[in-house]
Image (cartoon, rainbow, N blue to C red):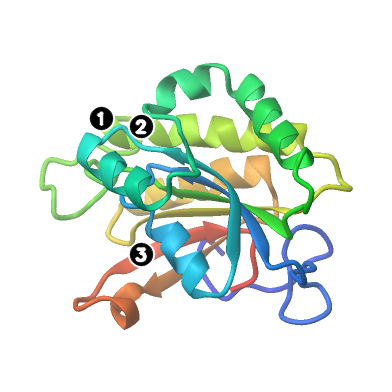
């Protein structure tokens, strides 16, 4: 199924108990693609995690200024496209930074809420996944693939969290799911309405290999 309740698997999809990664050090490494105001870092901190290495990729000047003020320890990458052009170099540099830490993170989280304009039902002239800024999904997938290629099995697990609107056409939902599963077959799509943390309904699809 393209969307539904997640179930544990032997590799990469942690279950609620014995399969959960060791979080005793409570540290997370974070790659925040299309990071906006870095709500993902705020959420991880609110959940009790300590964010160590933080790479933030966002080309909006106002958002970047806010995030760099609150989190001056981060690495700011700007536009995703030049990073994706040299994605294997980027993945190697990121992993080497993590390996150099005195305390290894319990997991690496790759967050990616990619642009929704060409998928959202609100846009009556939407053109689909391969158009406009929404097509930046493919750069994000390339970075995800490079990180998977670079990571050694003995290193912290890589947890992907991709997000977009539930109002997208079914063919886009299917394509995104298949594309991400080509990188990690443990990816599942889960529908969650963020109304519990917002003042309005925000039905979203979330693609992840982390148990939800």
Where in the figure is residue 106, as x and y percent of width and height? 74, 60
Secondary-structure class at tag 3: strand
Q: Mark 1 points at which residue?
A: 132
**Residue 190 visible to an observer of this rendering:** no
Q: How crowded is mark 1: few (under 14 residues within 10 Å), some or many (20 or more)?
A: some
Farthest-out residue, right: 154
How far apart marks 2 and 1 lie (CA) works out to 6 Å
Place of residue 33 in the rendered image (x, y in percent of width and height, measured from the top left): 44, 42
Residue plotted at (31% across, 69% down): 203
Q: Give the CA separation, mark 2 to mark 3.
A: 18 Å
- Pointer 2 with pointer 3, Cβ within 8 A: no
Where residue 54 appears, x then y in whole percent? 54, 45
Place residue 25 in its image quadrant: bottom right
Of pointers 2 and 3, the one earlier in the residue sequence: 2
Q: Which residue is drawn at 28% across and 32% down?
A: 133
Residue where numbered disc 3 is placed:
204
Under tag 1, what secondary structure?
helix
């Amino acid at each position: 199924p393209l969307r539904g309740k997640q179930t544990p698997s032997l590799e990469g999809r942690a279950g609620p108990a014995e399969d959960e990664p060791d979080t005793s050090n409570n540290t997370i490494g974070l790659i925040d693609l299309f990071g906006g105001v870095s709500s993902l870092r705020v959420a991880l901190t609110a959940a009790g995690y300590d964010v160590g290495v933080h790479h933030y990729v966002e080309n909006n000047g106002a958002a970047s200024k806010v995030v760099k003020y609150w989190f001056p320890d981060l690495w700011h990458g700007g536009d995703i496209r030049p990073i994706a052009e040299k994605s294997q170099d980027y993945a190697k540099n990121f992993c080497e930074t993590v390996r150099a830490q005195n305390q290894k993170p319990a997991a690496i989280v790759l967050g990616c809420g990619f642009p929704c304009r060409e998928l959202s039902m609100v846009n009556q002239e939407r053109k689909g996944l391969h158009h406009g800024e929404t097509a930046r999904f493919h750069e994000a997938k390339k970075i995800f693939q490079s990180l998977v290629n670079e990571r050694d099995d003995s290193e912290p697990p890589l947890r992907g969290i991709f997000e977009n609107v539930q109002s997208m056409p079914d063919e886009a939902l299917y394509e995104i799911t298949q594309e991400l599963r080509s990188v990690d077959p443990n990816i599942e799509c889960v529908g969650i309405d963020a109304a519990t943390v917002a003042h309005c309904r925000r039905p979203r699809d979330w693609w992840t290999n982390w148990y939800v």
